Image (cartoon, grey):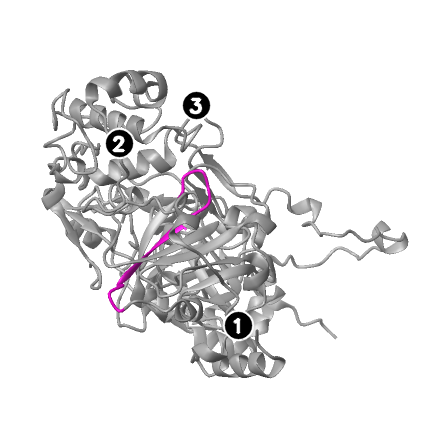
Amino acid sequence: MFTRNALGAALLVLVAGQVIAAETPHLGTPVTPADIAAWDTSISPDGTGLPPGKGSAAQGKEIYALKCTGCHGVAGEGKPADRLTGGQGSLATDAPIKTVGSYWPYATTLFDYVRRAMPLNEPMSLTNDEVYAVSAYVLSLNGLIGEKTELNAKTLPKIKMPNHDSFFIVYPGNLK
Amino acid sequence: MAKKTSSDLDLGELELAAGNGLVDRRGFLNRAGSAAGILGTGLASLAVSPAQADPLKVQDWTKTPGLGFTAYGQPSQYENGVGRGPIVEPNAMYKTGPGSIRSPLQFLDGMITPNGLHFERSHNGIPDIKPDEHRLLIHGLVKRPQVFTLEALSRYPMTSRISFVECAGNSGSLYGKTAADGTAQTLHGLLSCAEWTGVSLALLLDEAGVDPKAKWLLAEGADAASMTRSIPLAKALDDAMIPLYQNGERLRPSNGYPMRLLVPGYQGNMNVKWLHRLKLTEGPTMTRDETSRYSLLLKEGKVAQFKFPLDAKAVITKPSPGLTMKGAGLYEISGLAWSGNGKIVRVDVSADGGKSFAPAVLSEPVLSKALTRFRLPWKWDGGPAVLQARAVDDTGYVQPTRDALVAARGNSPAYHNNAITNWAVAVDGGLKHVYA
């Protein structure tokens, strides 16, 4: 708890452009890892955060047909939503085609994005096994893994995406 | 005694500052006596005043009592043509999917965007968040992971700043090989500016106790896209904040109600709306919207990632396509300039397609990472003209021509296009977007 004077002091130091921890309100409520498990789902490119579970392209094919073809096409050709397949070798041409296979630099991003945001009409409805499987299917459509390759927390981060090395990081500089 | 009319001011005597009729800002200021004289009715009447005005009549609204009071005001019914648009929905199957709608820049003046006209970009619709059930989680590499309610955050000392937000995809069509037909709104309207009031992010991070290993933080929205972006910790500690208010009222749902992130000057989508999670991390998380989206595909297939600040840009909003000029005479050229790297120090205006430039007047206040209004009188002779505005910021950066930008980056980056725009004026007074 803080007193009225303490809050006044905090306000004063803010005006001066400085923050002193001891005199700020401290109104957050502590949480444990168990409390935040449902939200703490983001995945690093090294695979940190990938959940238990597994799936292969063969298993993902059916899920894809049911949940994804409406927007992404039978073989990932896109329309109305993003094209997911093909385009490798097109990026330096006049008509670049940006897909998971041609453009995305990390396979972990695919799992992370599908799990949090897909399908568009019911995000977070797939189980972890289903997300591994449908990710495997999209990667296999791009020729990056075989139909029977099992994706799991260990194998997924090891997949090297074809366009990975084309990326360079601008920050903390700027691009002219 | 003859009444002195505005036509007594001989336009021929105005000191010209650049080709094709651009008037020197200081010379005109001196003649008119004050800036208010230029910006008010004086300028319009110079251009269009007839020899003799009609006799004045007392109108009905002066003779009958007006309407009563309303809890939340609306614009005049005569301004109902001013609105956002067009709605862009990439996914035709789902009407609420990802999309955007643009601010009507050519109908606005000043530096602030009204809340109902602030541009919108969302990645899976606008969530209907119950404020009492919303939580902000700060966790990861911190000593004290914790959650905040809106009520708790509302008890913190508030800080305010006026800041623009611009979508990284704004003006993206200028990378195209042919000049897109469009207006200030349709070409450049993913841009707005508001006064944001909320809690300093540095203060909350200080309370949480940041682990020295942390160099980035992941910001996540509570929308159905769980929009996520990695933000450098240095930026978070520098000038980031968590706004709860927009132009004095609580955030609009489309702008992040009940709380968002503001990272002044950085790509629009990094100002994560509906903010509900900040995770301190060692490195960037490499989310979809910072890898496959919002990265710049350059020549030879190289991809520039994490280009964050929106570089300096100026856009003439008046006159501009859709606002037809009514005959030769004196007009005010006016527009917006901004830089994600600091403060605008100069805006140069050209009426001859970039052959010559004259510096515009910058309307106060001129603030870092905020929209700046610029103005310059122009004596249009009724002939063809090409209008340009070029911004210069306090880092010394000069806004590039489109040719220079495309020569450096190619046609495929999609994002961060800050090239100079050309508005061609035809003899009938119509304006059109062209490449020089």
Of A34 and A118, nearer the camera is: A34
Q: In the picture provided, is B32 more to the left or to the right than B184?
A: right
Kindly report which numbered mark, 2 or 3, lies closer to the viewer in this rendering.
2
Residue with the mark numbered 3: B93
Give the magenta-colored segment's residue range.
B212-226
Same subunit: marks 2 and 3:
no
Q: Give, as a three-letter code, the residue at label 1.
A: Pro
The disc numbered 2 marks a residue on which chain? A
Q: Residues within 10 Å of mark 1 (few under 14, many from 20)?
A: many
Q: Is residue B107 visible?
A: yes
Q: Position of residue A171 (x, y in %)?
A: 22, 60
Residue B218 covered by magenta stretch? yes
The disc numbered 1 marks a residue on which chain? A
Q: Which quadrant of the figure has residue B2? A: bottom right
Of B127 and B436, nearer the camera is: B127
Residue A53 image label: 2
